[in-house]
Image: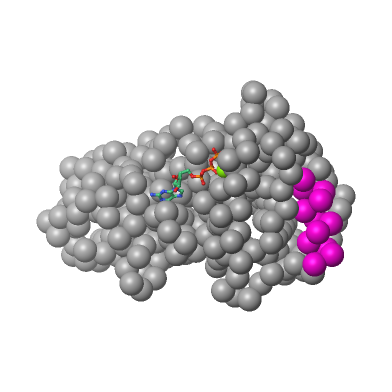
Amino acid sequence: MGFFEKIKQGLSRTKKNMSIQMNNMFAGFTGENEEFYEELEEALILADAGMDTSLQAVEALRKLVKERGLRGGEEVKSAFSEVLTEILTLENHDLSLTTKPSVILMVGVNGVGKTTTIGKLASHFHEERKKVMLVAGDTFRAAAADQLNIWAQRGKADIVRHEEGSDPASVVFDGISAAKARGSDLIIIDTAGRLHNKANLMNELNKISRIIERELPEADKETLLVLDATTGQNGLIQAKQFKETADITGIVLTKLDGTAKGGIVFAIAAELGLPVKYIGVGEGTDDLMPFEPEVFVEALLQQ
Ligand SMILES: Nc1nc2c(ncn2[C@@H]2O[C@H](COP(=O)(O)OP(=O)(O)OP(=O)(O)O)[C@@H](O)[C@H]2O)c(=O)[nH]1
Ligand SMILES: [Mg+2]
């Protein structure tokens, strides 16, 4: 399946819930009409785009329709695509990893898909002939490192792990030393999503960040916050908490295939101001897609 078709398929629930209805509305567009805008706003809100963002999108469309004197449904749809693309477009949608080694630190609450995303990334970078080092910074459960190890084997990556309960920062230290020794291109660090409490979790992430900064001051670093699209507005609340303490450089939005409320992506971009860098559309190795606003909107609205 092609790249675009895969994104479309990953969005199929959201398309059923939101886009089909929108396409019907565009097809029936007969000129300025309050009900049209109200329904459009409602469809966005029902898909979890958030009240403010939905209102903002509809107002922007109303303005374009007026300014350009749009009359036909297709023209209005295309203007709406522009509006949605603009909401999603922030700076730095691509990973910025040019140094050797570079570092990706993966954070997020438990179960959102951190380890799975790392596995997918490891395979992807292996295909690009990059030498990848995985670091099992989730020492909270032994199973976490085992799970990462399976992905390391699948993606032909190296891995550094310690026993359960050991200090995550020291695993990270060892992982960085090993990566330097072996000439790795990329270090990807897994972290625990659950600790005894939230303050512990945030302290630990800070400690890990300080080690990375100290050991690799010149390296390019990405701290990716993984959010589960099926948790909707809850994910946004988590994101705001992480954003306060960690220097998040981008979002990975997983499980878009499992939700009819993929509109959450608009709320994320508008309310957090953080670029989505990847979307997860399934559990397989190939089910992680780089996020491009224009392509995403096209996949979402295309019939
Ligand atoms: N359908 C679907 N499932 C996904 C996706 N990404 C991850 N999952 C599934 O979500 C579940 C949790 O994924 P993990 O990678 O273990 O999540 P985690 O964030 O590492 O969880 P903790 O280690 O407990 O903090 C697994 O069953 C994954 O297969 C996705 O894009 N689509
Ligand atoms: Mg995990």
**Relative to the observer, which residue lies in front, 289 or 25?**
289
Task: Name the side, left or right, on which 46 lies relative to 101.
Answer: left
Point out residue 5 in the picture as x, y percentages from the top left corner.
32, 68
Q: Tell me the residue at 59%/61% (across/down).
A: 153
Point out residue 133 in the picture as x, y percentages from the top left corner.
70, 60
Q: Tell me the residue at 72%/40% (across/down).
A: 163
Point out residue 81 in the picture as x, y percentages from the top left corner.
34, 61
The answer to whether any part of residue 66 appears in the image is: no
**Relative to the observer, which residue lies in front, 5 or 149?**
149
User: Relative to residue 266, is residue 92 depicted above or below?
Assistant: below
**Relative to the observer, which residue lies in front, 277 or 110?**
110
**Relative to the observer, which residue lies in front, 200 or 67?**
200
Q: Is residue 181 magenta?
A: yes
Task: Name the side, left or right, on which 273 lies relative to 44.
Answer: right
User: Relative to residue 235, is residue 101 depicted above or below?
Assistant: below
**Quadrant that contains the C terminus:** bottom left
Task: Name the side, left or right, on which 95 lies relative to 218.
Answer: left
Question: Could you tell me what secondary structure mostly forms the magenta stretch?
Answer: helix
Q: Is residue 3 magenta?
A: no
In the image, farthest residue toward the bottom: 129
Point out residue 138 in the picture as x, y percentages from the top left corner.
66, 41
The answer to whether any part of residue 257 appears in the image is: yes
In the picture, residue 216 is in which quadrant? bottom right
Q: Tell me the residue at 21%/43% (across/down).
A: 39
Magenta residues, as a range? Answer: 171-182
Q: Where ligand 2 lies, by quadrant?
A: top right
Q: Tell me the residue at 55%/67% (across/down).
A: 124
How many numbered discs, if any? 0
**Quadrant that contains the N terminus:** bottom left
